[in-house]
Image (cartoon, rainbow, N blue to C red):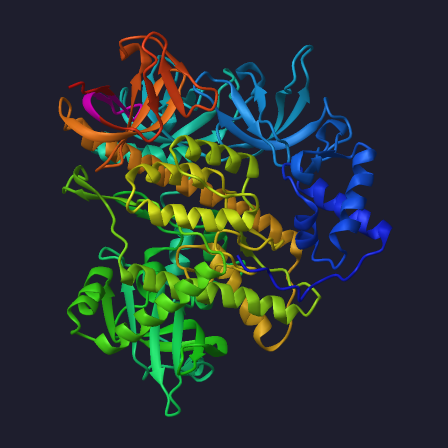
Amino acid sequence: MTKRKKSKSKGKLDVNTLRSKILGLFKSNPKKVFNPKQVIRKLKIKNNKDSVLDAIMKLTEKGILIQLEDYKFKVNRSKGFGAKTNDRDRQLLVGRVDMARSGDAYIIVENVEDDIHVSSKYLASALNGDTVEIKTWRPRGRKKLEGEVTKVIKRSATHFLGTLHDTKDFGFVIPANTNINTDIIVYKDDFKGAVHGDTVVVKIIKWEGKKLPNPVGVVTEIMTDANRNDLEMTGILLGKGISIEFPEHVMKEAEDLSTEIPLMEIERRKDMREITTFTIDPVDAKDFDDALSIEYFEDGTYEIGVHIADVSHYVKPRSALDKEAVKRANSVYLVDRVIPMLPEKLSNALCSLRPHEDKLTFSANFRFSKDDKIIGRWFGKTIIHSDHRFTYEAAQEVLDEKEGPFFKELKKINKLSKKLRKQRFKRGSIDFGAAEVRFKLDEEGAPIEVYVKERKDTNMLIEEFMLLANREVATFIDKKAAGKEIPFPYRVHDLPDMDRVAELVRFAKELGYQMNINTPEEVAVAFNKMTEQSKEDEILKMLEPIAIRTMSKAEYSSNNLGHYGLGFEFYAHFTSPIRRYADVLVHRILEANLEGTYRMDKEVLESTCKHISLQERKAMEAERESTKYKQAEFMGKHVGETFDGVVSGIIERGVFIELVHSKAEGMIGFDKFPEPYEVAANRLSASGRRSGEIIRMGDKVEVKILSVDMAKRQIDMEFVIE
């Protein structure tokens, strides 16, 4: 990875300021480990490594920092640094509830390393995903804190799916989600026509009943006639607190939007309707966020336009549509349905860049020289007219056959995208190329085929120009700030966890694969080399998910940390405002800073960034659950059949097997093994106590499907022994 430029360097700091800045860095990153070189890069200072090391050692001598091997240091959390209060045992903390199947919960608190256990009797009315305040204490003889919920600050969900039970005086709904450990009281007047045994959606209107210490709700929907698939998908969405229907006032505001583009609006924009423009999207897409254009000039230069749906033109700040969009934060893509961030009139019609229609866009235009180097950039509001709508497959066919609509333009753009991609990897971008599972469904939504999506040139073509636009927009804002920060919703990705990286190196060595990894820069090089070699060596593919787990999670923040995985110093999301609220914010702030200078309240922005990051995680969890359900449903049709797989995980109870074709994961318990097995401390292998036979992560195996538990999404297997 090339070194990041130091245009914003703070210069050489005096001893006291340097020590203060270093202390602030470690205290604000209590889970991170830094060496002097990393401190210099993070703080963007000109002090040499020796002076920084001396300042760090002074803090270490005071017990504020702890020295690890190879001149690496971390904050001393036992002294209270990194905690939110001075009292390290009895504190009031705020975190998110992660419910266990036992009924107990763990509270995830930012900047606290270990999750805090809360017994079910101390949860009050808190449910899975809620944001809560807890008081903590440390039981005698134990290292970890315990807690009790003192206040529910924010509810994760208000609607739940469950079964209605009718009693003499009232009814109650037993939630389908096993992470919800309370029944919901429903009084007879609020049954809304439902009867005993019906599957219903219930909305909680009061969190503590008068007669019983249970929440009180009303039935909003009866799902008796729904098929099993609809019930499961609804349960997944509601379980994550994802709103399925739009409120009436939001729908009305959407319906009142005019479909006509006023002449005055056209006149204030750059008119690009005569320039060759097209979209490339999945075959089943309806919300076309982005389009590409290409225009040639007499001097041999040319311009690529990245045109993005101008959602901010229709969705105004503080409008009903805006409030609902920020609440949802993103669209949710399950296997068989999309829960959009915006009503269909916007997502599929007004904003969607459909072919042969004039559309309002926000564009990032890049002027290239004859030898394909960027020589100019322009950002602004435009109006376009897409000439053609390609699917990825159709565009790829034109490239492969060397003929068809806009072949010349596709060929040029594809060639350029490969150059940009090569440059990106040279700068340190990491290519994980994770497998993306796809399903072919019947009319009832049941899976009839499972396959891994193949990434073609056209997929990577679009990806490359979206990355270019996202990077350049964020870079523009930073340069515009000229040393005085413009609060902006960056997409950030921090450095990897080097302890986990060390585990990966040890495991790779056991597989006979050497990885030279000492610094984050070397991590990027090694990961890319591993990904490339895994195309020829199947066993190395098992390293990829482990490598991904060493990475920090990407998120939104008003504090720019750069994007390690992409190797970008500045990065934001600009290219998908139909489905991501972060992009809407980027559009608004960018537009306000094109002519003048605008600074949003940073605290408000950071709060919004945290919210949309959380909503993104919920959406990803829901999407994963729907995929896991469909994989289990598909394998349920193949009980008794045998499949090729690889060992993908090892725990005390048994080994996980990932099937090669469907990527479905099942488990074989050690109770099905012919002898007791002992799991290695690193959980990368297990050995038979009598035979010494070893089973390792990544081993190729053949398994038989014994049963499928759809309620638990569990696939039970056994080894096929020749």
x then y, percent, for residue 179: 43, 24
User: What number of labels is visible?
Assistant: 0
Position of 23 with respect to 453 (left or right) is: right
Q: Is residue 194 visible?
A: no
Tell which of 20 and 236 is nearer to you. Answer: 20
Q: Is residue 710 magenta?
A: yes
Q: 95 above or below 607?
A: above
Comparing 526 with 226, the one in front is 526
Give the residue drawn at x 38%, y 54%: 251
- The spot of residue 85 in percent (x, y) is 75, 32
Q: Position of residue 282 (x, y in %)?
A: 26, 57
Q: Is residue 26 magenta?
A: no
Q: Quadrant of residue 722?
A: top left
| Image x and y of residue 277, in percent | 30, 76
Query: Over which residues does the magenta segment extend?
Result: 702-716
Q: Which residue is the extreme one toward the bottom?
A: 298
Seen in the picture, residue 309 relative to 320 is either above or below; the reply is below
Q: Quadrant of residue 690?
A: top left
